[in-house]
C-alpha cells in the first residue's frame, strides 16, 4: 500500500487509477500523478476542481462574446 502525499492515508494505486479513469477518462491519473503518490479521493477532488474551473472559464468567455464553435 502507498501513502497519499496529500492526506496521508494508505491507498491502492490501482484502485485510484481505476476510479479516476472511470470518472475522467483512461490514463488521466498517470498523466496528473506520474509518481502514483495521490489517493483516488484526493485526486478526484483536485481533478474535479480543475474541471469545474475550466468549465467556469469557458462560460465566462462565452458571456464576453468569445465562441470557439464558430467556424
Image: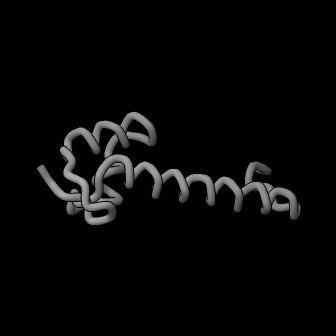
Viewer-proximal residue among 50 and 41 = 41
Task: Please state the horizontal and vertical placement of residue 25, each as a whole percent of the image.
Answer: 41, 40
Q: Is residue 35 left or right of residue 71?
A: left
In this rendering, the count of numbered labels is 0
Q: Is residue 50 left or right of residue 41?
A: right
Viewer-proximal residue among 61 and 14 = 14
Viewer-proximal residue among 5 and 24 = 5
- Give the residue at x 32% y 46%: 27
Q: Is residue 33 above or below residue 24?
A: below
Res. 8 image quadrant = bottom left
Residue furthest out toward the left: 1
Q: Is residue 63 above or below residue 23?
A: below
Task: Please state the horizontal and vertical placement of residue 41, each as a whole percent of the image.
Answer: 37, 48
Task: Please state the horizontal and vertical placement of residue 44, each as a whole percent of the image.
Answer: 43, 49
Res. 24 image quadrant = top left
Q: Is residue 14 above or below residue 61?
A: above
- Give the residue at x 34% y 38%: 19
Task: Please state the horizontal and vertical placement of residue 11, each as a whole percent of the image.
Answer: 21, 48
Q: Is residue 35 left or right of residue 33?
A: left
Q: Is residue 47 left or right of residue 27?
A: right
- Give the residue at x 19% y 51%: 10
Residue furthest out toward the top: 22
State how the image is colored. one colour
Amino acid at each position: 500500500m502507498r501513502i497519499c502525499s496529500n492526506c496521508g492515508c494508505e491507498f491502492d494505486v490501482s484502485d485510484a487509477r481505476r476510479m479516476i479513469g472511470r470518472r475522467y477518462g483512461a490514463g488521466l491519473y498517470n498523466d496528473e500523478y506520474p509518481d502514483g503518490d495521490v489517493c483516488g479521493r484526493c485526486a478526484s477532488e483536485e481533478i474535479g476542481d480543475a474541471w469545474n474551473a475550466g468549465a467556469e472559464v469557458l462560460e465566462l468567455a462565452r458571456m464576453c462574446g468569445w465562441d470557439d464553435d464558430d467556424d
